[in-house]
Each structure stands twice: as structure tokens, then as C-alpha cells.
Image: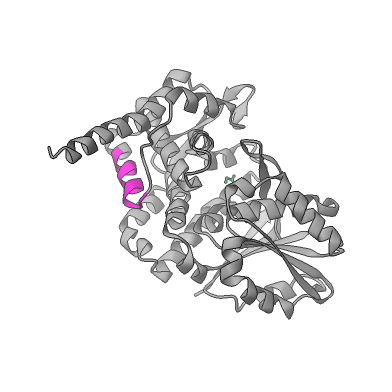
Amino acid sequence: MSRLISVSYEGKPCYDILLEQDFQMLPSQIAKLSDSFAKKVCIVTDSNLADLYLKELESILSNSFAKVISFCFPAGEEHKNLNTIQKLYETLITEHFERRDVLIAFGGGVTGDLTGFAAATYLRGIDFIQIPTSLLSQVDSSIGGKTGVDFSKYKNMVGAFYQPKFVYMNLSLLKTLPKEQFISGMGEIIKHGLIKSSEYFNWLKEHADAIQNLQPDILEEMIYRSCRIKQDVVERDPKEKGERALLNFGHTIGHAIERLSDFQLFHGQCVALGIAAACQMSRDLGQISDEECNDILSVLTCFGLPVSVCHLSAEDILAVSKSDKKMTAGKIKFILLESVGNAYSNTDITDEQIMSGISYILERSDSRREEEQADAAGF
Ligand code: GLY
């Protein structure tokens, strides 16, 4: 089993995405980089991945590069910042990395985003390779060249568009991915179906058991289909001037919840909450039916994603949503559903309409709390 997707950038072939079940094909991909044996490589990874797989990867790469070093930072979104970037620059300078040398992002979205940003800026740009290991980074963040770090409490506020040399996925690594991170990746995958393909959304529903049992052929098909959807969008709009913004479906309210919960919830969980709110707003506008809205919520729930949240205030979510960077000329750019499988960007949304979406995910948690209290009281 093996799949290949070739991604173009500004109309020209740019990089390949390989879906494999092991690392066997990695050396032959590296051999395609000119003169790799004369180059140094720095594997950038986090503390979780380093314990599990770093030795294996170092040993594979030692036959392909002149020198292999590693830079390991503590796992977690709180380390996706300029301090980690500074430490990485210091390592590269100490190890005399030159412009021809290479970085490898080995990990999830945090690793990919910050390694890509370091690659874009160190010596005005050096090559980098993505080896995404989480479901979310495989289907989303490793594709399309968005790199960057959080700044203060602002997510992805500092960054650059910078394309990798190639993206290599060893899908067998998903076996050791913590369950909650797998579920988080499903938030982005369900989003792909909702914004671009009702057929894919229905396929996900039909294959829910096989997906949750990590059946390799079904997982590969799912990751391939999600990568193809993302590829199509980023090829048409690499710098998010239009269509790419549709990928932000669920992210405006999602990012606000992520920030307000101090990044204690996973990204995909926050996206699921944002999707639930955006579905309510789409229903208010008569664009999707009650049945469709309820169906979307039940699919999110079926994959273990939240559709309600406690302990946050609607006013805070609204205020933080409006300070997110997805604004055009001071107006919030909201991604809603025209129908299931077809998203659009709406810049005429009022605070009241946003509040309806936010209340929906908060109200649900209130009613659920009452049910739980009633259950606990033995009713
Ligand atoms: N994750 C959204 C994008 O790549 O545009």
C-alpha cells in the first residue's frame, strides 16, 4: 500500500506527498534532493516523539546525509513560540548549518509549523522536509506551506508561506498516536467533507467503525482523500486570497475557544465546537436543514468530538472571535455552509448571528449539565 500526491505551487510542480506504511522509501526520496550526502540535516522533534522514534529515524538518515543532528523541544502548543525558534537558530548556528543544509519536521502540527518557519527564515531560507506523525498534521498542517508560531496568546500570528521539499507519511506511526489526538485529527477530516464533498462526508459516516478501529486500508484511503481535498484548495489559492479561507470552517469560534481554554482542549476538538456553532448559524440562515445540522452534530459526537463546552462566557468567545486574524477591512470573515459539502465565506454576519451559534454550543452544555445532575440525583 502506497500513495503519491504531487502538489503544484503557482502552476508548477512543487513537492510530493507520499503515504507509506513504513520508512522504507524515505532514503530514495532524500536521494532526489541534489547532493544530499554533502549536506547536514537537523531533525526537529518534540519530547514525545523523540522517546519513541528518534533513534530509528537518525539511523535511517545517517546513510543519506553527511551529518545528522537533532533538536528536541518539550511537547505542547505552549512551546510553539519565538523562544523555541530562537533555541533552534542557536543550535543551527553552533552546528554551522549553511544555506544548503536541511531541516526535517518530525512530529505533529506544532513541530511542522515551527520547523517550517525556522526553515523559511534561517539564512533567508533553507530546505525542509515534513514527516508528519499525527493525523491532524498529515491531513492538514503539513500541506500547503503555512508555517509559523503563536505570539503571546495569538495563534499562528507570526509566520510565512514556505513550501516543503517533500512530505513523507509513515501511517504505521498512527498506532502509537494517543487516542485524543486521533480524535482531534478527525475534526479536520470531517471539516473537509463538510466544506467540499458531501460524498466524502457520507463515506466517513459509513466507515466510522473501520476508521476508529484504525483499519489500515481505510485509514490510508481517508488520509489520501483528505490530502487531495486540501491539495486542490491550496493549489488554486496558495496564499489564502479567497478559496483557501474555506479551510477555516469552524476555526473562528474554534480558535477563540482554544485561546480561552488556554490550549487545554485539542485543536480538532475546538474546531468541532466551531463547526457545531457555524452549523447552527447556517441553519438560522436557512442554508442547511434541522436534520442536516443534527446529522453533522451526531457524526462529530460519533467520532468522540465535543459539540458543547462548559465554563466559558458567550461574550468572551464573541470578543476573542472578533480579534482572530480572519478579518477583512475590520469585518469578520465567517465560513458557513451553503449546503453539506459546500462552504462559502460570509462577511455580513452580525454579532447577533454569531451569538446564536455560540449560545447553541453553550446552551447544549447547560442542558446536558441539567441532565447529568438529574441522572446523578437518580431521576
Ligand atoms: N489549515 C488551514 C490552511 O492550511 O489553510
Quadrant where ligand 1 appears: top right
Q: Magenta region's main secondary structure?
A: helix
- Vertically, is 18 above or below 202? below
Please provide percent x and percent y for residue 202: 34, 52
Q: Residue at the location (64% across, 49% down)?
A: 79
Which image quadrant is residue 355 in? top left
- Answer with left or right where residue 365 lies relative to residue 99: left
Please provide percent x and percent y for residue 269: 44, 45
Q: Work out which residue is located at the far bottom of the displayed protein and give it.
A: 63
Q: Residue at the location (60% across, 46% down)?
A: 78
Q: Work out which residue is located at the far front of the displayed protein and give it.
A: 377
Which image quadrant is residue 96 in? bottom right
Q: Is residue 303 magenta?
A: yes
**Which color scheme is applied?**
one colour
Residue closest to the eye, 311 or 56 = 311
Which image quadrant is residue 81 in? top right
Specify the segment rendered in magenta. 294-304
